[in-house]
Image: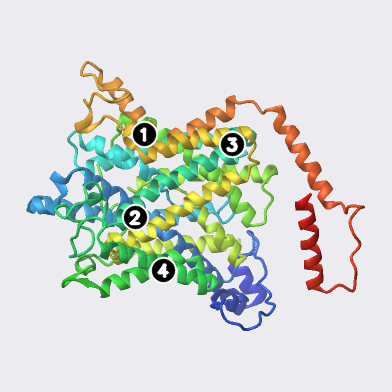
Amino acid sequence: MGIIEMWKTHGAKAALVGEYDWKFLCTLRFPFCKKEKTEYQPPPFYAHDETLSLSVSAMIGLQHALTMSTNIITPALLIFNVVMSYFPEIYDPSLGEEQAANRERALDVAQYLVSASLICSGFGTMMQVSTIRIPFTKYQLGTGILSTMGTANQYNAIFPVILFDIMSRGYDIEEAWGKLLGTIMLCVWLEAYISLIPYRILKRIFPPYVLGVTVMLIGVQLTGAGIRFWGGGVGCSRAPSDSNPCLGNGEVQLGYGSGPYVGLGFSVFLIFLFVEIFGSPFLRNTMVIWGLLGGYAIAALASYEGDRFVTGDRMRNSDVFTFLWVETFPIGIHAPAIIPMLFAFIVTAMETFGDVTATEHASRLRPSGEDHSKRIQGGLLGDAIATFFAALGTTPPNTTLSQNNGIVALTRCASTSAGYACGFWLLVFGVIAKIGAWILSIPDCVLGGALTFLFANIIVSGIKLIGFHRIDRRTHYIVAASLALGVGTALVPAFSSPGIGAGAERPNQWWPYDPDMSEALNSFRVGVMIAVNTPYFIGSITAIILNLIIPVDLIDDAELEIEEQWNVEEEEPLSTSKEEDPTLTEKDKVEEQFKDDSEETDV
């Protein structure tokens, strides 16, 4: 039933206002008060195919949009900051007016990409929550459940390195971005092909612990980037000193790790803690955005020796509205990026596989059977199509976002009406250019406090996925071997650093550059080295290969049978157990149990 039908059947009030328990959603909690707890009946559960009123859809959709916003804005900010740190001779404003102008131009492009990413995520979300049947086939586009789409953060690990390789060949950052977009549009069709593979094969290749290893390694690498921001910025973190000040914190320019930077970032963490303890479901669902707003407010009020952490120049100079293609880039293809990009889309497919399944759990839908297979297929194809059009819209790839499943569970609303409303809010956020300008004016240290927490949540999600599967000896070995290579590469990147740019002729590479190499072979070499130097690539490919070649040991099955037998025995009452004396008080029962335990220990 749509809104119009609801209006005709139940009246205007039902269609516009509805009957949602707003008290449940907006009531703060005070856990340390001694007031007696009262029984509270949560609101009813709204199924994925249930129509919501406009006001309920708008409010639930706003929660999803606010939760996603930090995730969506991060790639453009992180990628451009890292790339600028690679080329201080081009972007360090202390070297002259030309470098200062280059930096401002790069930040203008990043601001546009933030807005464009929000817009593309809005369109992608609307498509993904739909069920669009493909004529004359058994396939569909979209999941038909509340699967929200946003800019993917797993590409943050490889895009700066690819852009560095392109710019090392003489291109500027806008030309390099155009080549990156063209390569995305070429490689994304691998994910579309994966969507056509039968579900039973995908399940065999990508069991939960393989997905968990991938997600966990993505979080490990990105958390390091968050800490770089928290300490003051990416560029100054490479060589911390007073002579290398951090430039992304308004007028305050201190060395990396300075006290004011760390303190402002920590204020975001304290706001997170306060919201988690006292916040209503609405506030806790949107915790990250409130942490950013609170940290920004504190930074705006603070100063250091008369210098401000927040300036309003970018807000004043920004246009009011924007849209896609306000900035354009010359499309091209960068051959060395094809190999790491193809595997990145395999990883995206793996993540989407897990995200759609998790959304089904939160939506109280059975994660098996024909409908489940169709949702997986539609979600993977939706990912590919959304990414292709995102690249046409000049932004990084899109993918499903798993953190929104917590909102589905807490609000007890899985209706796709909220998904359409979420897409609408994201479009509004993106079209208003002042929002993008505000995001660019957030001090790096404040942004770093939020990003570190956000990326650490990805690690926890990976750990949960690993825990979905029984950890027997085989699984233990696969996870350990994969994390050994993945985490090791994240901690010591020099172990397999790619030989590109000025470092192409270093003699200590595992595949050194040879001047007699053909251009094609050198492109292949660079692509392989970028891939192997990416933690989630080396860890994921290791997990996939080991999962396929290591047989299931019979001893594992025997151990499983024994454990099941133990569980059955624990549920059965023991014939030799003592009968409980009804005259005993609770204190006597505890003392008797303690006495029995002591006797068993002595024996």
Identified by mark 3, the residue type is His
- The residue wearing badge 4 is 270
Q: Which element is circle 1 on?
A: loop
Which numbered mark, 2 or 4, is in the foreground of this view?
Answer: 4
Q: In the rendered structure, are the residues bearing label 2 and label 1 in contact, judged by CB atoms less than 8 Å apart?
A: no
2 or 4: tag closer to the N-terminus = 2
The residue at 22%/26% (across/down) is 506
3 or 4: tag closer to the N-terminus = 4
- Return the mark for residue 476: 3
4 or 1: tag closer to the N-terminus = 4
- The residue wearing badge 1 is 533
Which numbered mark, 4 or 1, is in the foreground of this view?
Answer: 4
The residue at 66%/82% (across/down) is 36
The residue at 41%/48% (across/down) is 153
Q: How many marks?
A: 4
Identified by mark 1, the residue type is Asn
Q: In the rendered structure, are the residues bearing label 4 and label 1 in contact, judged by CB atoms less than 8 Å apart?
A: no
x and y percent of residue 208 in the render? 59, 41
- The residue wearing badge 2 is 116
Name the foreground residue: 480 vs 79.
480
Identified by mark 4, the residue type is Leu
Name the foreground residue: 148 vs 31.
31
Q: In the rendered structure, are the residues bearing label 1 and label 3 in contact, judged by CB atoms less than 8 Å apart?
A: no
